[in-house]
Structures are given as structure tokens and as C-alpha cells.
Amino acid sequence: MDHKEALALMEAVRDGRVTPEAAAEKLGETAFEDLGYARVDHSRASRQGAAEVIFGEGKDPEQIRGIVASMMGRKASNILITRLSAEKAEALRGSFPFDSHAEARLAVAAPQEIPLTGSIVVVSAGTSDIAVCEEAALTAEALGSRVTRVYDAGVAGLHRLLAALPQLEEARCIIAVAGMEGALPSVVGGLVSCPVIAVPTSVGYGANLGGLAALLAMLNSCASGVSVVNIDNGFGAGFLAHRINQMEGI
Amino acid sequence: MDHKEALALMEAVRDGRVTPEAAAEKLGETAFEDLGYARVDHSRASRQGAAEVIFGEGKDPEQIRGIVASMMGRKASNILITRLSAEKAEALRGSFPFDSHAEARLAVAAPQEIPLTGSIVVVSAGTSDIAVCEEAALTAEALGSRVTRVYDAGVAGLHRLLAALPQLEEARCIIAVAGMEGALPSVVGGLVSCPVIAVPTSVGYGANLGGLAALLAMLNSCASGVSVVNIDNGFGAGFLAHRINQMEGI
Amino acid sequence: MDHKEALALMEAVRDGRVTPEAAAEKLGETAFEDLGYARVDHSRASRQGAAEVIFGEGKDPEQIRGIVASMMGRKASNILITRLSAEKAEALRGSFPFDSHAEARLAVAAPQEIPLTGSIVVVSAGTSDIAVCEEAALTAEALGSRVTRVYDAGVAGLHRLLAALPQLEEARCIIAVAGMEGALPSVVGGLVSCPVIAVPTSVGYGANLGGLAALLAMLNSCASGVSVVNIDNGFGAGFLAHRINQMEGI
Amino acid sequence: MDHKEALALMEAVRDGRVTPEAAAEKLGETAFEDLGYARVDHSRASRQGAAEVIFGEGKDPEQIRGIVASMMGRKASNILITRLSAEKAEALRGSFPFDSHAEARLAVAAPQEIPLTGSIVVVSAGTSDIAVCEEAALTAEALGSRVTRVYDAGVAGLHRLLAALPQLEEARCIIAVAGMEGALPSVVGGLVSCPVIAVPTSVGYGANLGGLAALLAMLNSCASGVSVVNIDNGFGAGFLAHRINQMEGI
Amino acid sequence: MDHKEALALMEAVRDGRVTPEAAAEKLGETAFEDLGYARVDHSRASRQGAAEVIFGEGKDPEQIRGIVASMMGRKASNILITRLSAEKAEALRGSFPFDSHAEARLAVAAPQEIPLTGSIVVVSAGTSDIAVCEEAALTAEALGSRVTRVYDAGVAGLHRLLAALPQLEEARCIIAVAGMEGALPSVVGGLVSCPVIAVPTSVGYGANLGGLAALLAMLNSCASGVSVVNIDNGFGAGFLAHRINQMEGI
Amino acid sequence: MDHKEALALMEAVRDGRVTPEAAAEKLGETAFEDLGYARVDHSRASRQGAAEVIFGEGKDPEQIRGIVASMMGRKASNILITRLSAEKAEALRGSFPFDSHAEARLAVAAPQEIPLTGSIVVVSAGTSDIAVCEEAALTAEALGSRVTRVYDAGVAGLHRLLAALPQLEEARCIIAVAGMEGALPSVVGGLVSCPVIAVPTSVGYGANLGGLAALLAMLNSCASGVSVVNIDNGFGAGFLAHRINQMEGI
Amino acid sequence: MDHKEALALMEAVRDGRVTPEAAAEKLGETAFEDLGYARVDHSRASRQGAAEVIFGEGKDPEQIRGIVASMMGRKASNILITRLSAEKAEALRGSFPFDSHAEARLAVAAPQEIPLTGSIVVVSAGTSDIAVCEEAALTAEALGSRVTRVYDAGVAGLHRLLAALPQLEEARCIIAVAGMEGALPSVVGGLVSCPVIAVPTSVGYGANLGGLAALLAMLNSCASGVSVVNIDNGFGAGFLAHRINQMEGI
Amino acid sequence: MDHKEALALMEAVRDGRVTPEAAAEKLGETAFEDLGYARVDHSRASRQGAAEVIFGEGKDPEQIRGIVASMMGRKASNILITRLSAEKAEALRGSFPFDSHAEARLAVAAPQEIPLTGSIVVVSAGTSDIAVCEEAALTAEALGSRVTRVYDAGVAGLHRLLAALPQLEEARCIIAVAGMEGALPSVVGGLVSCPVIAVPTSVGYGANLGGLAALLAMLNSCASGVSVVNIDNGFGAGFLAHRINQMEGI
């Protein structure tokens, strides 16, 4: 329930159309459904511009099924389920319509075609980073953004990155994905004038510390205009990039 | 052996009813049984208000069976066995009476109905935190506290939490369970006037560092009245909450 | 504004005594005063049972003076100011009445005598931990709890701790303060049946990592009924101990 | 030199207006001035939409003076100098025109009035975070964005934050600044539909680990649409927020 | 494309043999082949003296096959594939000619005999470090360096190392490989006058922290002339040692 | 070769009984056998009072077999093989005579009865620490020390430890083994006057960080006379305890 | 009060010479003096073979003076005060007799000549480690052990260490002190047959992490017979070395 | 004493020109001078190609003076003293001839002109890294290498680095110095075919963790041919670069 709806509710109270008790209850309860194991957030779309996203890890198929049913009952579509293992995807097969993307461990329930607009570029340092890239790209596409992929353009062979400069320069938002030393976002950040979202990946070994090395590097980027999300968090980057891509003019 | 018993023992020594040698020995030995692999602490209930709790990890079924037998020999009931894998629970089946809770990896040996009193609320940030929540809730219930569960009320959808405000306000102690950024206890702590026990969970990935991120957040809570237990330590929270819930008035 | 007040407000709206616009504004604004640099939380006492506490670090004397003035304007007393350096305390001298405790870096503004009830014990491992102990003890006393101090009773000389067993056994809540290896709370926790709040201190050097060693030890305590607060957080322990100490019976 | 200029250069080579040797040299050198201790990046504004920013730490006044002179020689204005200590600011006094902001450790050299457009909100958890907030706000203003400040609205007193909901909802980009447990960005992120930039601060002590606790919390935010910059990096947040704020429509 | 080629290209443009558009495109694109999932870097050999090396981890056999095919299409030989699991090696069997080394998880595609020159010594602290040693030795041999192996010569039995002193003294570059406390490179570094490359391994347990202990020790070596590569990075050490070994005189 | 033997060698050189070349070679080579994958240290017993110990992890059965054969060829007995998995022990069955201890992952090759003297006590905090304890106890026994075991005597039930005080007081060296908070060595260290070797174990979860919490606690012990070995390093503690136990008088 | 005294006390109770109440009190209280800020442990010498040691850090001169007075009142001599800053030493001048050692930050109160016996060697890697070495050596000497110093014998110049081999071989216990990579104890441990106590120091910079690098290296020593104390803990090493040095024969 | 000298010594023993006792002593002692606080390593130049380097931190001026005197007594020249504070340099003024470089905290005692040969490039990411760069450059020059400096060529403005490509391509060894995200060595490593030594600096703040972020990034470099030294270790890089630069041909 947003501010305007709250005001409307109070006017209803004033006019006697709603009792105070009902209003107090409604303030807290209308916006979600309590399934016991989950409080499905039905006001998220109006509040945040996109339906609740289901974090698949740590939920069993029965719980996921219940949450999706609750959301589909409210007419939600293109419901994202992230970090969904192949086993769970298989277990859910037939319960409700969904498209699944194995490499990205992502599913889109109640899928619906929507026009893709704007321009996001997802650029990766290496081939091994593609799973995270695809999570980002598919998320942004499910939300309605057009995405260009530039994979394996790491800084050890700069010309591979510079060849994509025309695409980078036309982007409204860039997602730069890298493991190991995580240098890509700094170099990209120095070349363009749009917001850059850096995504560290756990690709590497030893002193990469499961992606912490790349994460720290990105947080310390000497380039301006770069911000960072969690290690391997393709979803988060895709969601935010979509938000930026869809900005209206002032 | 508590202070009063020690005094009584010395009076017995003075009166010649007990020899000094026997007394010295008794001081150390009466209060536990030495099984070789375990020194079962039989004075814990009198000393701490609850029987010894068996940490199931790293013990084989034979050892657990021996410890339970020793305790049941002393008439202990509602004996908690924590971090008990499904395999070990299966192996113990039939050895002694117990209720087991797979999700919480908890068993209650020599189960006995006791009245539940007071009011503890267990509130979780997400559905994936429920296993830890149940360990906490079942522990408190086994010890005799009444527990209310409010699951999936994380801060990204505040209205889901605020809807539970009446329940939170009536609690004598709240257990706030969260993984990822661990923000829930701070928000809860700012809303209520009872003690809040924060339980970080290992739910999340990447920079959650296996729960350290949530743990650190909770230790730095800007809300007053919040203390913290180990990552995923539902048992510890449930035990302490019961202790607080059962406080008598001054 | 608590739940009851919210209900009352809505009844006023229904009855036409308050306009919806005024109500919506009141919902957000009545409970604090915006000084620009601080939003002084005037509803905290009713919500949490104690007035807002001022974190002195990172605030200049002018800001502290403004916040205290705002709170005193609402008749608050025994206002705690924590982590107040000697320099700032000196700078504030004369601005408003306050008692200051240099070692504990604590001040109590608008001090007022209140009866001390219940029983909290603050026990420390060493002499060097006393500053943190005093922050805890003085906080609890300012809030209205009676406090007993047992200092320098670390585990390397157990008899020093065991000599205090009668006091420990009579406590309604114990605050156990230790640096270095942080073993004290585990030993205390094994001896008593009341809640134990563990406070790690930064006392030590080298591998104590500024108190992290003690913190980790306490979080892993094998004794039940122990929870932990931040390193050197005497205030937090004192506040929570007071809350537990003041519990009414079920 | 951007892509178009490179093409133009090659056409000049083709037409014989420029020799290949001169072109090869120009490709590398025209875009910066080499002062020995610094290679001042004169193409940054055209490449990135804003002039080079001077990181004041670790540079002596003489070096800063030289860099500013080089930039002013190219007609740059509103040149940002970050992390400039009071001593260095004093030493620079008179060398060139600049506005300095002591709390934010920021100076704006060759200051020039520009219209402020759009809407950025900087919201802080506490009063002690204000220095970082001001660095962010002043950076965005120097670049041309309109900024609203909401300070001391941390989650331990939610109503203080909710009172600012109208302002938050109207923002095109929000900068959420917090130390300690760093929960603010998650709560803000759950309330709004614009991009949220989280800035962890080093405010706190002990297990805050110099701001790492807040940083980790923010990276693990359960709210969507949140990204993170380095600890205490107000500048980075302000720069990125301006970039997002100034987005044109698709 | 190196500097000379760039100059040649521009002369071609000037002379009208190449259009500016074609030149601009060529600058970016001729040097790699875009397979979608990989941008195979065909200029690396000319730029760096060795063909691109394929990091096998995180790539599926199909991708590896594609990259090798692209490189073999350009006549590359002795193509290194590192961190290649036995399963993937098996899956690739028959796709193209290669030698594989199971222990070192290394394969050399399109193998070709080349003369081995110079002198590199690979010395290990223990038997358990041999896998990493072999990755280093085989890499250097594939590139054309002669390698001597001295295994299990750790510092707890110095005479085993001193017995190899003649070999160490004749080396042009030494690779010192050790897990646990990582002391070997310091001792070796104190005995010789050639560059020493230290390779920490993950051999050990507990406080070895997966090789971090050895890594840190090596970075802090009190011996001069020692530098360090990533944990278990035998490839990196072998590549660099080859580069040093092949140095020409001034 | 010890100092005396070196002197003798030089006298032989002087007297013409040995050529200088042979002497130089002998200095380095006589004391070990080079198997290619291992340089078996045959002088260790004379140098260090005990034969080389074989670290079983990371060696394949063939390598272990070769090393044992080399040592048995030099008449070594009671050869310790540590961290030997059940699989490898099985694979070695029949290759040479050995006793194996599954729980302690330890084998004693070429076993030989020797008299046990002196007095070492191994005391553990919990039942789950027994595997590490047994590695320590069996090591010391294989070397010739008499060992007393006191298991599950953690600080949460002090009386269990105090009951063993007579045994502790008679020990010449104590090995104190604990996971979780690692408090046991501090308490033991405060009770006795012999050297105490602290062994942290990885028993626990969450903030135990795989044993680091216990390790740090032990390093910061406030008791004097305590030193520490690596996490789970039962062997190291048993070896050192034996060395101390066997000390002769001054 | 040791076990024998406890038995005697109980016999006195049985014989009516002591009341039970007095005995219970005596059990706890006779062995220390409570100064409020310190519980001076008067039974430590009988329990542990050496008087209590005063940790000077975090105690003010007044507190140190009080503790020393209490101990001197019980006839203690050679009382060690560690980590005593020059300022505090100066402030204590005249309060009681003491020898102070500025570099080692150590004082010996109530100094008394005692014969030095046995043989401890303190060996350091570098000149910068001498302060820690002296703390160790002076501690052992104050307790009655003879100490030989071998300074600046680090592994980067092995011959410097090997020259001291005769001294090392005659030691009953060796203290090996090193910062940076901390390799010295491993090399020493491989050369001798007596216990080796490793002391990491904070000497170094960068990735030495304040001594953690050396600490970790020492904990992972591949040499047997080595144990470790806290960073810069010369006192702990000296105390333990003395204990080992003074061992009687079996 | 190198291998040849040892052989010569033994021939002298055989021929009766030297007694065995004298030889044994000479083996250990001729190669260093024992000053008590330092064992000055006089054989280092013959062993390692450069005289001992004095680590100035943690040594007092008197000690430094003594070591230099000992070395000058053996005719050493261009003796490096690293990490020498301005205060110590001042205190040493007049004791012996030396050149000092304040910014690099480096002094060269007994300075002597030597011809500079070969080609090392020191390239830095920023102006704030110059102190470390100069330590590297001056070290290499003192040892006899020619050095080119390219400062402030970080990856956020790639053209500044690419403009130095001709210099980079002509280097025999490159030292790449960077703080913050430490991306420079990866980019440089991808452009050249000579060895690259990466030096992380502590420049930055917050999540740079005192240089650890840059260190980790460099260790994980995706470019081949890169190795790493300790944070801020300009000396180590300069020493090693000189060694590589001076390599003779095979």
C-alpha cells in the first residue's frame, strides 16, 4: 500500500465507509498473504515496480509451488525464481507454466512476452563467467530491457574489449562481470559515461577467496560511476540495470 | 553439587557421618558419570535449571545411546539432542523413546508433556531460515515455554513485519532469525521493549561468508536490548529465551 | 506512537476531529524532532522502556548539546551519553546538568535519583577490563537496576571466581566481561541458571585481533544460556541486563 | 579521444592532412598532459561526462596545485578534490579559487554556478554518518544535481524514516548511508522503486571492523535494486547518483 | 596488433590502400575471433611470446573444443589447457591431438617437439606438492625450457636441500613450491643469485587456511629476489620462469 | 650428520682416508635416500630423536609404500603415518606390517613393543574431540610415553574437570584438546605447574570458523605455561609432549 | 589452596577445629586478596610454581602499586610486570624496588638474586626482533634459568644459524623468535631434538598483517616438536621455556 | 662461502695446511661478523650478487651505524638501507657517507657511481603510489640498472597507459605499482612479453584493507607472466627487477 492508498483509506475512514478497526488491520494485512512458511508480498509490484522475486535456495519445491500459486492468484506474470537447482526445476515441472534456464539457474514462471526497450550491455571477462552473466541478462529481459552480450573480453587482451567500444558507448547501463582479479569494471568504467554495475564472480582459485578478491577490487575501483553487487549476484545486477535503463528523463 | 549441598556435606564431615576422604572424592565425582567417552553431567539440572543437552555432531549413535541411557537412569526427561542427522536419528530408532524433528535436526528423548507458559515469539526474515527457527522454537517448547511463529517477515517488505506488531508487543522475549544482511533484529529491536535474541543464519551466498555478514551486522545493531548467538544456533537462542521467559518478578 | 495510539488517531479521523491529511502527517512526524543533523526519537521511551541513548562518538559537542536540549524539553531524565571523550565532556561542562564517568567514557545528563532494584552481577576476567565493566554497571544503575561488581576473577585462578559463587547464584542476570581468550562467560555459564550476557573486550594484543578472539570464543560458548554483544559494548550489556532484571513474573 | 574523433583523424591521414607518424603519436598523447608525477586526463570529460577528480590523499599540495593548474588551463571548472585534509586545504589557499567543505574533506576548484536539476535524496542512519553524506551530496551538487538531505533516520526508530517516505518516493536516485549494522539500505530498498546506492561508513567500533560489517550487510541486502560502493566513499555515491539522476528517457 | 603494425596500417590508409572505416574496424577486430562464448585472442603470441592459454575450469568440453579449433585454425601449437579435470580430458579424447598429464591437470593440444634450452629448477618442500610442481615443470617444458626437478627437500631436513645446491646454483630461474609454513622459498632465496618464483600450495590443514598461510609467508620473505604467484598456480610459475629463462643478454 | 660426525669426516680427509670430493658429496647425500618423489630423511632419528613421520595426506599408497620400505631398510620401527584415510590404509594392507587406528587416522608401521614411561595426560573438552585426542595419545605411546586419557571434561561442567585434578597434578605434560570456544587449556593451565600443550579442534560450527575461534582463544590464554599447535594437530601435540615427558633432569 | 591443603582443611572440620561455615569461606577466599580492582592470586606460586605475573597494559600505576604491595606483603619476590610502558615505569619509580628493562617493557619487582641453571637458547631471525627476545630471556632468567642469546640468525643467511649449531644442540629448550615469514622455527626444529617454542613477532609490514603471517607459518611448521605462543609474547615463551628447562628426570 | 671455497678448504685440510678444528669453525664463522645485535652477512654478495640490505625499521641508529661500519670494513659500497625514517636518517647524518631519499625512505651508504645498463620500466597507477615506485627505481639504480619512470597511468584512463606502450615494449622487466583495485599489472601483463613484477600499495581506504585488495587482485591476475611482492615493497621489486634485467643470454 503506497502513500496515496493510505490517504484514500483514511478518507474512507473519515467518511464512515470503513471502520477504524478494519483500516488498522488493512494497513498491515492486505498487502501480503500468509502461507505460514511465507508471507507473500503482494504490494511489491506497486511499491517497487516489479513483483516479488523468489530466492530458490533453501526452499523446497512445495514451498515454491505455494508461493507461485499465491502470486499467480494475484495475476502476477514473469515471476523470477533465482538459484533454482536443476533438481527442483524438474520437481516443479507441470505445476505451473515456466521457462527455465539451466546454466543461469533461473526460471520465469507465468511467462509472458513483453517488449524489450532501452539498452543494457552485459560484458564478461571470461567464458567461465557466463552463468552469472546469463542470470543478469535473462533477469533484465524478463523485466523488459533489451540486452547485448559481450563475453570473454577480459583485460589481458584489451583489444577484445576495445572492439566492443561502440556497443559500450551506446549502452544506457553496463553490467561488467569478472572473477579472478576483477579488473574489468575499472577499465570499462574509464571508457564510458553511463552507470556501470560490477559483478564479482567466484571464478578462480586460491587467493581469489571464493570471489572476495574480485569483490574487493571492484569496491576499490579507481573509475568513477561504478557500484558493486554481491559475488555471483547476476540477478541483482540485472534487476538494478533494468531499473536504470527504464529511467525517464527529468 | 550446589553451595548448599557443599555446606551440608561439610556438616556431615564435622559430625563424623562422612570421612574427609569420602567427602573430597564426592566433591568431584558424584555429579557426573564417566562413560570413558563422556562424563555425563548429572548435576546440570540442579545447577542450571535444565538437563544436559547432547550435541549430536561428532558423536556416533553408540555414544549418544550411552549418554541418553545414563541420563534416563537418573530420571531425566525431555532430553534434547541437537544437530542430529537423519541417518543417526534412524540408527537410534528403537533404542529409546524420542520425538524427532528432521528439518530442525533435533530430537527430544524421553519426551514428556509439560505445560507451556509465558510468551516467546520466533520471527524470521525468510522462508529459508525456518530450519533454524524451528530448532529454536522446539527447544523452548521442550523446556516449557509457549512459542508463536512469525515466518518470512524480512525488512524488504516492512508491512509484513508491522502486521505482526501486536504479537511482538506481547512477547516476553523475541528470537529474531535472519541470514543475508541480518537487518531484522535491529528493526525488531527498535519496535519492542522486551529482550531480543538475534540469530544469524548461513542463508545467502558469496559475501555472506557463511553467515558472518549477518552475525557482524547483528553484533553492531544500533537498537538497544539485542544480543547475539552463534550462526545457525537455534538451540542456544531457544534455551536462553526460555530462561528469560520463565523469569519470576523481583 | 504505539498501536493503541494509532487506533485512537483513526477514531479521531472517523469522528471528524482530525483531518486525514493531518493524521497521515502525524503518523510520521509527532514522534521525533528534526534538528537537521538529528531526528531525536521522542517515542522511544514509550516504545522501548527507556529514552534514546546518545552515541557520543562522531558527534561534536554542539550536536550533543542540541540533542540533550531537545530531550530535556520533553522532560527526559537520566539521559545516557556513551563513548564520550574527556575533551567533549569538558566542552559540554555547564551546558546542562550531567554526571560524567571518565573511565567508562559515559555521562548521564539530567541525572535523577531512582530506586535500584533486582540484582545484576558484573564479573570481569581482569583489572584491565574494568572500563568496559563500569560502562555496563553505570548504565544499568542509571536505568534503575542494582549492580554488584566482581572484578579480576579470570579463569587462570578459578578460586577467585568460585569465591564469588554465592553472589553469582543470587543474580537475576550476569554480565561476564573478558578480553584475551574470553573464557570467563563459558565457565560462569556452566555455574548458574540465570541469563549470562558475554562482553568481549579488546584487552590483549597480537592474535587477540582487537577483541575478535574473545568475541569468537564467546559466540562458540559450550555453556547454554549465554548470548553476546559487540566488543567493548558495556552499554549494550548493561541496557539488556536491566531489561532482563526488570522482568515481571508470568 | 572518442571513436568519432579517431575516425576523423584517420580521414585526415587518408587525405594527407596528417602524417601517419603524427597520428600514431596523437592517438596516445593528445588526451593528457604529463607533469611527471601525474598524467592529467584531459579527455575524461568528453569520455565520461565529468572532468577528472583529484584524490587528495597521498598527494602533496604542490602536486595538487599542478594538476589543478593543468585542468584550469583546459577551461575545466567545478573540479573536485576529495579526501583533502584541512592542512592541505590551508596550504592551497590562494593558489587558485576554490570552495572547501571541511567536514566532507572536499574542495571544488574553479567553482562555477550551475543549475541543479532532478532529485537525489541522501538519507543517513545516524548523525555520525553526516561527513560521508555531505561528501556525497556536495559531489552531486557540484555536478549539477538537486539533493535533499534526510539525516539520522536509522532503523532503530522506523517512524523517523517513514516520515520521509514522500521525499524518498519522489527521488530519482537514493543514497543510503549507514555504519554499524548497515541495515538502512535494505529497508529503504524495500520501500521505493528507484535505484538505491548503499554507502557503508566506518562509524561504530569493535566488530564493525572499520566498516566491513556494514559493507557486508549491504552487499547481502535482501532488497532488490541496491548496489554498493566502498566504505566511506561518499564521493563515489554522489558521482554515480548524479549519473543516474541525469539519465534521459529512452 | 603491435605498434609497428599500427603504423603500417596508417600508412596504408594514407596511401589510399585501406579506407578509414576498414582501418578503424581492423584496429579492434582482426586480432581475435568471436565465438560468442569466447573471444579467442589470436594476437597474443605476437604480443606476449606465447599463444593464449585455456583455463579449463568453468568451461565445458564443447567450449574448449571450439577454442582449440579456432587456435589450430591459426596454426597454433603446444596449446596449454590448465585445470582440466580427468572427466573433461576424457570427453575431449579424439576431438584433437593432445598430450594430457592427469596429476598436473594439464593438457597440451597440438603437441609439437621443440628443443629445450636454458635451465629451470623446480624444487618442492614435500611429496604432496608434486601435482603443482608438475604443472609448473610441464608448462615450462611445453614452452621450450629445460627443467630439473628436486622434490621433497623441505626445510625440516635441510641437508636434503643442501645436497641439491649444485643444481640450484646453476639454474637461471628457480621455482620453489611449498605448502604448510611455506618456508622453502626464503631458504632457497638466501642461497642463490637467480630469480626465485615462490608457489604456495594448499597442502596442509587447519591454520594453513587453504594455502593462505604459505602465501603470506612467501610474500613476507626476508630473502631478496623472491616473488610470488597464486596458491597452487603451477602454470603461472612455469610460464614466468620460462620467460626469465629465455632472456637474452643486454 | 651431526657436528661430531662432520669433525670426524674432516679428520678422515686430513689423514687422506677420504678425498675432499667424496667428503663434499657425503656432507650432503649420505643422510637421505632420493626416491624421486621423496627424499627420505634417514638422519632424522639421530638428529631429532625420532624417525621421520609420514604425512599421509596427498601421497598415494605407492608413494607411502616406497617411503616405508626405504625406512624399514634402515631398520626404523614404529614409523608413524598420519592423516591416513581408511581407503589408503586398506590399500596398504599386506604391503608391510602396521597397526592402524581408524578414528585417529593414524598407522604405526613396523610396530614394535617399547616400554612406556613418564606421564602425559590427554584431556578433552568434549566427546567430539576424541579423534584428535587419540591421534595425540597414540603418537606419544608409539614413541614410548605413558598416557592417561580424561575425555569430556569441558568447562561448562567444571566439576568433571576438577574430579581429574589428581591426575592432572601428577602429569609431566598435559595435552588439552578443545573445539568451540577453546577455554579448556586456560582453565587447566591455571591449575597445574607442568607444561600444557593446547590443541584446538574444528569441532563446532558457524563462528568457530573451522577451529580458528578455538585456536585464537588458546593463543590468547591468560594462563602461563601454555603453548599451541595447529588445529586438529593431535600428532604434533603428542610428539612434543613425548619430548617434554622424556626430559632428563638438569 | 592445593588438594592436600583441602584434605587437611576437611580433617580440621571433622575434628571440630574449624566450623563448616569457616571452611566453606576459606575454600574460596584465603587464596587471594580482593583489592576491588584486582583479586591478587596468592596461591599461584604453590599451584603453578611461580608467583602471579602482572600484565601492565590497561592498568594504571596506582593499581600496579597496589597489586605489588599485596604480593610483597606475602613475601613474593622477582615479581614480573610485563608490557610496562616507560611512562608507567617512571611513575612507579620509588614506590617499591624493581629492575626495569625498557626495550623489553619488563620490570622485576622485589628483585632477588637466584642461581641460574639449565640451558635455554633464545634465537632470533633479525635485529628488529630483539625486544621480544629480551622479554623472553629476562623472564626466564628472573625465574631461574640460564639463557644464551643468538640474535640475527635468520634463514636468508643460513650459515649464520648453522654457526650456532653447537649452542642449539646443547639447549634443553629453544625459543625461536621471528617476524616476516616466520620460517626460523621450522629450520631450527629440523636441526635439534629439544622442544622448540616459536614466537611470532609483528616485525614486518603489509601482508605480515601485524604478525599473523609469521604466526600462521609457525602453526603450520613441517618440523616436529614445535609449539607456538601469541604474537610478540616473549613473556609466555620465557615462562614456558623455564618450566621445560627445570623438568626433573622421570 | 660458496661450494668452490668449501672444496678448497677441504683440500687445505687434506694437505695439512688447515686443522680440522679450524676448518669446522671457519665453515660457520668466516662469512659473517657477530655484533651481538646483528650477524652481518659478509658472504651475501658472493652468494647472491649483492651486499646485505639493511631493513631500517625496528633498528635504532646505533645498530644501523654498527652494521654499516662492519660492511664498509669489508669494502662494501652502495649499501641499501630501507624503511629509514627521516628522524633516523637525520640521526645518522655524519656517521658515514650516504645519499638519502626522503619520499622513498631509502638511503644508499658508501655511495659509488656505477654504470646503468639494461632497461627497467616502473609504471604506477597513480600519483599517490610514487613513494613506493621511487623505492623500487632507486634500488634498481643503486644496483646498476637503468630505469624509466611512467607515473599516473592507471586503467581508468587507458590512453595514458597506451601512450607509454613503446617504452613498455622495450623494457626487459616492468614493475607495475598500484593501490586501490590493483588492476594495472593485469593490463600491462596483457600488453608485453617481458616479466612483470606487480607491487600492491596501501593507497586507498576502506575495503582496500591496507593494500590487501590490490594484493589479492594481483595474485589473481588473468595475465600470464606476472608475479607479486609484498604490499608497498618497492625495494623487493627493484631488487628482483635488477636481477632479471641483468640476466645473461643462454
Image: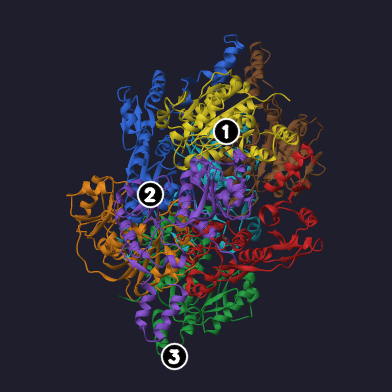
Chain colours: A purple, B orange, C green, D red, E yellow, F blue, G cyan, H brown
Q: Are marks 2 and 3 in contact (CB under 8 Å)?
A: no
Q: Secondary structure at mark 3?
A: loop
Q: Which mark is residue E198?
A: 1
Q: Which residue is mark 3?
A: C17
Separation of marks 2 and 3 at Cα, in angstroms: 56 Å
Q: Secondary structure at mark 2?
A: strand
Q: Which residue is mark 2?
A: A100
Q: Position of residue E109 (x, y in %)?
A: 50, 25
Q: Nearer the viewer, residue C231 or G77?
A: C231
Report the quarter where the N terminus of chain E lies. Answer: top right
The amino acid type of the residue labelled 2 equals Ser
- Which chain hosts label 1? E
Q: Position of residue H217 (x, y in %)?
A: 58, 44
Q: Nearer the viewer, residue C171 or G222?
A: G222
In the rendered image, is residue C155 in sight?
A: no
Quarter of the image for residue G136 reads top right
Image height of B208 relative to G181, above or below: below
Which residue is drawn at the image coordinates 70% and 42% (left, top)?
H161
